[in-house]
Amino acid sequence: MNDISSRPGKARRPRLAASAVATHAVLLVAAFISLFPFYWMLLTAVRPAQEVFSESFHWLPQTFVGFDNFRTALNQAPLVRYMINGAVVCLGVLVVQLATSIPCAWALARYRFRGERTLFGIVLLGLCVPIQVPAIPLFLGLAATGTLDSYFALMLPFFLSVFAIFLFRQAFKSFPEDIVQAARLDGLSEAAILWRIVVPANMPAVAAFAVFSVTSHWNDLYWPLIVISSPELATPPLGMSFFADPDIGANFGALMAAATLITLPLMLLFLLVQRQFIQGVTGTGVK
């Protein structure tokens, strides 16, 4: 009996091992595909132009010119200024988005009123509308008010985020009602309950949205290209266009060095809030 019962277990082990190997192989291939563009960016940033256009491929640079490429990138365009502009825009947009979306999400998650389902349906519908759809009316409105070519023009279309409303609503719906009722009995106002109790308890969701928001607006090229004409107000992606020369072509070494410098703040941000980001995404059911 012992021999018979042990045979199925022995037969399952190779299958499980093969399944695990196959799973890890697929994950390794996916990781390689995802990381290879970053590796190519770093490789191009530290090697000369003749190696970029060489027919043979080398995993390491044959000649290291990284310092020259990074020096050229910093001298050819004011990258620090572009990154400061990007930080101002991302921080301004994020603060207003949190100030507007958190109360809206709390109302949709906890209050029952006429038109609640319709309002939430409009929020879901808003997730399907890209910025390209209202771009012309927004541009005409900014032109009529004389606010083009400004930080305000860069931030205005993104002050209200329907994605943030949806994300925070999902997080707030799971918040214990007993804690809310106890806070009301203690005399706290609805605003105090939200900002002093609910929001601190849902900081992973806030961190997750902050990563989404900052990454989206730091990398945005479409809207700054429309509303900005002054080089001193250029955001990082728009500033990268100054490395292209229609006559002599782009200096790919300096271009990739600039791309590395511009990408570095986002990587550092993600590393700082990685744990909160994962908790926020998994906790709200957003995959």
Image (tube, rainbow, N blue to C red):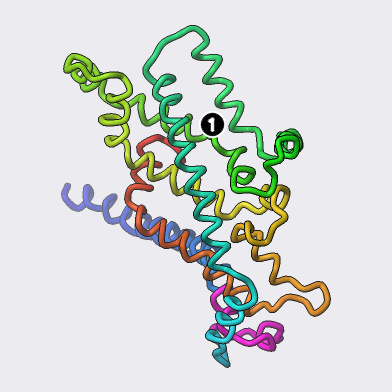
The image shows a total of numbered marks equal to 1
* Local secondary structure at mark 1: helix
Left or right of residue 202: residue 5: left
Q: In this view of the protein, which residue sits in the foreground, 178 or 31? A: 178
Q: Mark 1, residues whose alpha carbon is within 10 Å: few (<14), some, or many (≥20)? A: many
Q: In this view of the protein, which residue sits in the foreground, 31 or 163? A: 163
Residue 45 drawn above or below residue 259: below
The residue located at (60%, 78%) in the rendering is: 75
**Residue 39: percent from left, percent from top:** 53, 73
Does the magenta segment cover residue 56? Answer: yes
Residue 138 drawn above or below residue 178: below
Does the magenta segment cover residue 189? Answer: no
**Residue 100: percent from left, percent from top:** 47, 30
Residue at the disc numbered 1: 162
Left or right of residue 198: residue 151: right
The residue located at (69%, 57%) in the rendering is: 230
The residue located at (57%, 92%) in the rendering is: 62
Is residue 284 something one can see in this rendering? yes
Q: In this view of the protein, which residue sits in the foreground, 70 or 209? A: 70
Q: Which residues are magenta?
A: 41-59
Left or right of residue 231: residue 109: left
**Residue 157: percent from left, percent from top:** 62, 38
Left or right of residue 49: residue 102: left
Identify residue type, mark 1. Val
Residue 7 drawn above or below residue 78: above
